[in-house]
Image (cartoon, helix red, strand yellow):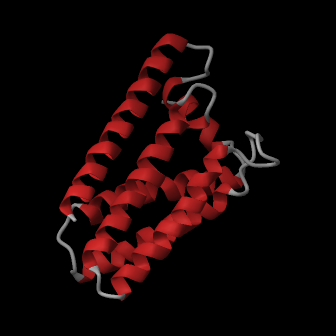
Amino acid sequence: MNLTPLLTADPAIQIHAYSAIAALFIGAFVLWRRKGTALHKLLGRTWAVLMFITATSSWFINEIQLIGPFSPIHIFALMTYSGLYDGITQIRRGNVDKHRGAMQGLYLGALILAGAFTFLPGRRMYEVFFGAADQAIGMGWLMSGAVIAVSLGMSGIFYWRLRNAA
């Protein structure tokens, strides 16, 4: 592991990465702990702010420009805003099941699935974990594929569980 690619990146990339990493760990804790407690509410609010920061900081990252200054990955920022709005609205209405579904979907889609794409060769987190894209390219592609496959599998399983729980 080499943190240099992250530590020398633009501030927007650093803010984006650090808030996403913090949201990944806090979100996992919130999602799999007892619900409705003061700690759940505090950490849930913290997670929502981190997700908002992650989504907002993404608009200032334009290394891949396929649609004007943006790339298809920016769709995840829109998905994050929508998911946060839906989840917060549902819990304020007292609809715990829809709140849970929105937050679990947001965690899986905007953090796990979108995060998996950062492990593709040529992306920054790939460099952090596997080195430059030209080093051990076969192993890097294999590991990237494994991360994406596991992420897609987890997303599918949780989606199926959410859909069948309703």
- Up-down relation of residue 94 to residue 79 (above or below): below
Report x, y in % for residue 116. 47, 39
* On-image quarter of the C terminus: bottom left
Count all numbered tags in the image, as a single digit.
0
Judged from this view, the residue extending furthest toward the bottom is 93
Residue 162 appears in the picture as rendered: yes
* Residue in the image at 62% along x and 14% along y: 134
Report x, y in % for residue 29. 27, 61
Residue 136 appears in the picture as rendered: no
- Up-down relation of residue 153 to residue 101 (above or below): above
* Residue in the image at 61% along x and 53% along y: 75
56 lies left or right of 128: right
69 lies left or right of 87: right
Q: Nearer the viewer, residue 87 or 141?
A: 87
* Residue in the image at 65% along x and 60% along y: 57
Q: Nearer the viewer, residue 102 or 123?
A: 102
Report x, y in % for residue 147. 40, 32
* Residue in the image at 50% along x and 64% along y: 51
Q: Nearer the viewer, residue 10 or 52?
A: 52
11 lies left or right of 49: right
Report x, y in % for residue 36. 22, 80
